[in-house]
């Protein structure tokens, strides 16, 4: 799901779609691609974009797997998430937990700033790079807390790992063992 090949195919498909509909919102693009009076995009609806992106249509299952899509039947919310992965549309107001202190926000912003610089410009690239720190034989649908701690320790920031973990727990409002791709995106969109 997050191999370099699939990530590249995902980006190429996204670019092919967005180049065809410049400046349009994801929901409007969805309406243009979907068949009339249909609330789902099917594999045949995306075949022309696969040709433009030079992607085999059979790769669509892998491309859309992280978005909860099965059998390439893409509903509007999944399509919006897919397009916003590389071209994010964020709210102007961050969704910060009220329990998050200024120090915890600072710790998270330094950590995320280094991830942004070191691991690429897109959320998928950052996710892909961070997943390499997961323990062996771990599913690539969750980024383990231990992997985040390894990344944090490698950055040599002037705070302890326990302060970093406390900041993550305060951000999510609960103790977490790992975070999903959408939670990872929420972290990046909320902390600047």
Image (tube, rainbow, N blue to C red):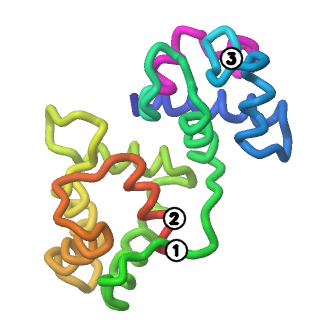
Residue occupied by mark 2: 189
For marks 1 and 3 on the same chain, the one whose residue lies earlier in the sequence? 3
Residue 159: assigned label: none
Image: magenta residue range: 47-64
The residue to which callout 3 is attached is 46
Q: Secondary structure at mark 2?
A: helix
Does label 1 or label 2 sit earlier along the sequence? 1
Residue shown at 21% from the left, 45% from the top: 134
The residues tagged by marks 3 and 2 sit, at their Cα atoms, a distance apart of: 28 Å
Q: CA distance from mark 1 to mark 3?
A: 34 Å
From the image, tell me which residue sits under label 1: 94
Labels 1, 2: front one: 1
Is there a contact, CB below 8 Å, between mark 1 and mark 2?
yes
Q: Is residue 183 left or right of residue 82?
A: left
Vertical side of 92 occupied by 12: above or below: above
Which residue in the rendered view is the most extreme toward the bottom?
A: 102
């Amino acid at each position: 799901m997050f191999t370099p090949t699939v990530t590249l195919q995902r980006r190429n498909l996204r670019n092919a779609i967005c180049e065809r509909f410049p400046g349009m919102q994801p929901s409007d693009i969805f309406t243009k691609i979907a068949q009339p009076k249909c609330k789902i995009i099917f594999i045949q609806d995306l075949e022309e974009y696969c040709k433009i992106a030079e992607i085999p249509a059979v790769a669509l299952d892998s491309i859309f797997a992280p978005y909860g899509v099965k059998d390439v039947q893409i509903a509007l919310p999944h399509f919006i998430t897919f397009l916003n992965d590389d071209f994010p549309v964020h709210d102007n107001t961050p969704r910060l937990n009220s329990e998050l202190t200024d120090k915890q926000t600072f710790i998270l912003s330094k950590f995320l700033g280094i991830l942004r610089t070191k691991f690429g410009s897109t959320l998928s690239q950052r996710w892909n790079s961070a997943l390499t720190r997961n323990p062996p034989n771990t599913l690539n649908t969750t980024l383990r807390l231990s992997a985040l701690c390894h990344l944090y320790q490698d950055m040599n920031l002037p705070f302890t790992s326990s302060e970093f973990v406390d900041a993550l727990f305060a951000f999510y409002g609960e103790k977490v063992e790992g975070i999903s791709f959408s939670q990872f995106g929420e972290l990046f969109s909320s902390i600047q």
